[in-house]
Each structure stands twice: as structure tokens, then as C-alpha cells.
Image (cartoon, rainbow, N blue to C red):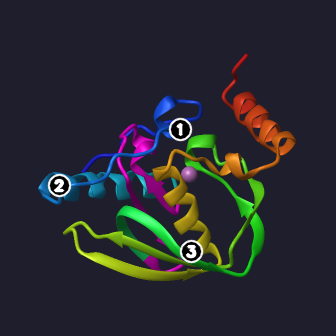
Amino acid sequence: MAVRKITEFPEKVLAEVGKAVTKFDKELEDLCADMFETMYDAEGVGLAASQIGLNLRLFVMDCEGVKLIAANPEIISTEGEQSSQEGCLSVGKVPAVVVRPQKARLRAQNEKGEWFEQDGEGYAARAFMHETDHCNGKLFIDQLPKMRRDMVVKRFKKEKNWK
Ligand code: NI
């Protein structure tokens, strides 16, 4: 297992729609182990493959008791609304309030290729949506009105000491 380098905004892979996971083998298991290790090392609750530079529809998460590997994820239903702070390891964890559904049902394949459905609420539902968005080339800042998006990007760049 190894901690991988986290891809940061505005690297291109973060804006690409991921390719489907088609091989469920030892290599995928090892990749997921690295993703968990990288996520825990960065003190995150979710990590998508694009965040370690891989164009793949895959994420791992461990959030409020929901620990899972999701290959080829999709959100199949949502309910209600919540508004709270969200951040992303690829945007330096700069927080911003994002409106999301309160509940979400995730459909995905595990590391063996078996399909499953998982319900999430609150923070876990938020993680399902945030990570599934990554697999579709979307970042949480894309959910924000332009002015607030620009503010998050500006703060992130400042923290990175960009000119
Ligand atoms: Ni993220």
C-alpha cells in the first residue's frame, strides 16, 4: 500500500468524465487500498480515482459509518435538501456552503464487480454526490454561483502561493 499524490485543481483529469471500471482484479483491490490510505493520510472522508490522476469511475469513502468502494457509481434517487459546508482534497479543503439533497441512494459495483445499492443521509449523502460528481468530471465548486466559486479558487490559489 502507498499514499499517492493528490491531484489538485485545475489539473485536467479532474474535469474529465471517468472511464468505466471493467476489470475487477487484484490490481483494482490494490488501487482501492492505496486510495483508502491516501484518503486517511489527508484526513478526508472520500477520494475519487481522478484525485490521484486516474481517469476512472471509482471512489472510496469512509464517512459517518458508511465505508465503501464504489466503481461505476450513480445516484439513483434523492430526497429533501440540506445546506452545509463542503470541501475537497483537490481544492485544498477550502470550504463553501453547497446545497445538496438530504438523502441519496447510490448504486455502484464493489471491488468484486457485484452491484449494490446504499442509502445515505446528511454528510454521507453529501459524500455520495460529491464523489460521484468527481467520476463525472465535476468538482463541488462547479455547484457554486460564479462569485462564490471564484472566491474559493482565489483562496485556494493564495494558500498555494500562486501568482
Ligand atoms: Ni472532492
N-terminal-most mark, 3 or 2: 2
- Residue at screen point 65% across, 78% down: 122
User: Disc 3 versus disc 1: distance between alpha carbons?
Assistant: 23 Å
Q: How far, Cα to Cα, is label 3 from label 2? A: 27 Å
Q: Residue furthest front?
A: 76
Magenta stretch containing residue 58, yes or no? yes
Q: Earlier in the sequence, mark 1 or mark 2?
A: 1
Q: How busy is the neighbourhood of tag 3: few (under 14 within 10 Å), some, or many (20 plus)? A: many
Residue designated by label 1: 15
Q: Which image quarter: residue 158?
A: top right
Say few, some or many: other residues with alpha carbon within 10 Å of mark 1 (under 14 / 14 to 19 / 20 or more).
Answer: some
Q: Is mark 1 within 8 Å of ligand 1?
A: no
Residue found at the far top of this picture: 163
Label 1 residue SS: helix
Confirm if mark 2 falls within 8 A of ligand 1: no
Task: Check disc 2 and report the residue beneath it.
Answer: 23
- Quarter of the image for residue 154 reads top right
Q: Which mark is residue 124?
A: 3
Query: Taking 147 as reference, is 5 left or right?
Result: left
Specify whether 88 is left or right of 65.
right
> Which residue does the image show at 17% across and 55% down from the upper left?
23
Residue at 61% across, 47% down: 139
Q: Give the structural element (helix, strand or loop) at label 3.
A: helix
Closest to the camera, between mark 3 and mark 1, is 1
Front one among 68 and 55: 55
Residue range highlighted in magenta: 44-66
Closest to the observer, 115 or 156: 115
